[in-house]
Amino acid sequence: MENFLDKLTPSYTFEIFPPKGNKSTEGTYAVIDSLVSFNPDLISVTYGAGGSSRDNTVEIASGIQNKYKVCGVAHLTCVGTTKADIKNILERLKGNNVKNILALRGDLKDESDLGEFHHASELIKFIKDEYGDYFDVFAACYPEKHPEAKSMEDDLFHLKEKCDLGVKALISQLFFDNDIFCQWREKVRALGIKQPIIAGIMPITAAAQISKVVEMCGASVPERVRRFVNEYGHHQGAVKEAGIAYATEQIIDLLARNVEGIHLYTMNQADTVRRIDAGIRSVLYTKRYAVYNDR
Ligand SMILES: Cc1cc2nc3c(=O)[nH]c(=O)nc-3n(C[C@H](O)[C@H](O)[C@H](O)COP(=O)(O)OP(=O)(O)OC[C@H]3O[C@@H](n4cnc5c(N)ncnc54)[C@H](O)[C@@H]3O)c2cc1C
């Protein structure tokens, strides 16, 4: 199967979430209408995150793939599930021509939630055992280590286990400090992990987002970001302006540091993406052209 990563480097990808509960998907499709105009290499759809509907993940990933003819990636978590549950979803994805999956464990509320899978690697192995190479499987990675990991070394050891199962590429947890990402990437490469590492970037669009994000994933917040959030926090419009400018500069710097892909956590805000896209587009295409010519 031809994959976007074989064609364009650095890749440029977006993440969206489906509606919560049984709310209509109309609003999500309006967001996708805008996002596809920026020519992403893929759009991924979260699964169950923040209470979003799981059924809608399959439907929307399928819409992206079949209606918009853009590569649709379905996130899939295995926490609290059985092999039969997972098989059922994989069959639905296959039936809908969705061939790309971001295979995740999902967040644990407590150990007793685990079900038949304990780690994302077991889900990846299950997909590979059952379907061979039918699906292209992506996995998550953590430049500042996963919050539960005993150490960075331990986390990287388990990352290598996932990669050795044949994942197509890694998508990173969000981060705000490019130095941290690049130092971590060196450690990943030193372990012999060769998969492309796609950098996850989340623009800050509201002051409250920072504390939520730090609590969720423990990302380091550079002094410069803290300063604009503190200084403009009472005025959401100003925080958003500063957040868009920061994300744009962060991406431009990552492209200069030869990142293999940019994955924007869009939070379904097409207007924010439009602003960032305008700021990075010429740099992204200059970089793509240079990489293509070097081959
Ligand atoms: C790009 C991205 C997208 C995401 N999308 C979603 C989503 O749509 N829905 C959602 O609910 N969540 C999502 N998440 C969050 C994710 O589910 C959580 O971070 C979860 O806690 C870990 O998932 P994982 O796949 O990285 O797990 P794993 O790879 O299983 O790792 C989890 C922890 O277990 C450790 N570990 C792994 N294997 C072993 C082993 N064999 N023995 C001992 N320890 C081990 C790891 O070091 C790590 O500390 C996303 C995260 C990222 C980065």
Image (spheres, rainbow, N blue to C red):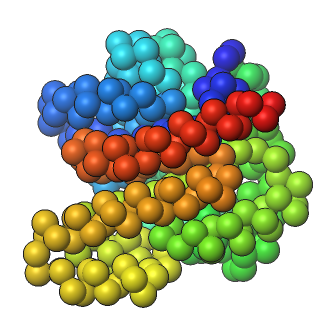
Q: Who's the residue at 32% across and 33% down the image? A: 35
Above/below status of 119 relative to 46: below
Q: Is residue 246 left or right of residue 131?
A: left
Give the x, y percent position of residue 157.
81, 64
- Work out whether 87 lies above or below 118: above
Give the answer, above or below, for where 221 lies relative to 185.
Answer: below
Q: Horizontal and vertical percent for residue 182?
A: 68, 67
Please state which of residues 18 and 222 is positioned toward the viewer in this rendering: 222
Residue ID at (57%, 69%): 178
In the rendering, at what x and y percent does residue 53 appear? 29, 40
Q: What residue is shown at x 78% (from left), y 35% (from top)?
A: 294
Vertical arrangement, residue 270 with respect to residue 74, above or below: below
Nearest the eye: 129 or 195: 195
Residue 101 falls in which quadrant of the image? top right
Split into 4 quadrants, where in the image is the N terminus? Answer: top right
Left or right, 129 with reference to 81: right
Quarter, ligand 1: bottom right
Q: Quadrant of the C terminus?
A: top right
The mark total stands at 0
Residue 162 is left or right of residue 38, and the answer is right
- The one nearer the camera, 9 or 166, is 9
> Who's the residue at 66% across and 25% down the image?
7
Report x, y in % for residue 215.
Answer: 40, 77
Residue 123 seen in the current view: no
Q: Is residue 144 visible?
A: yes
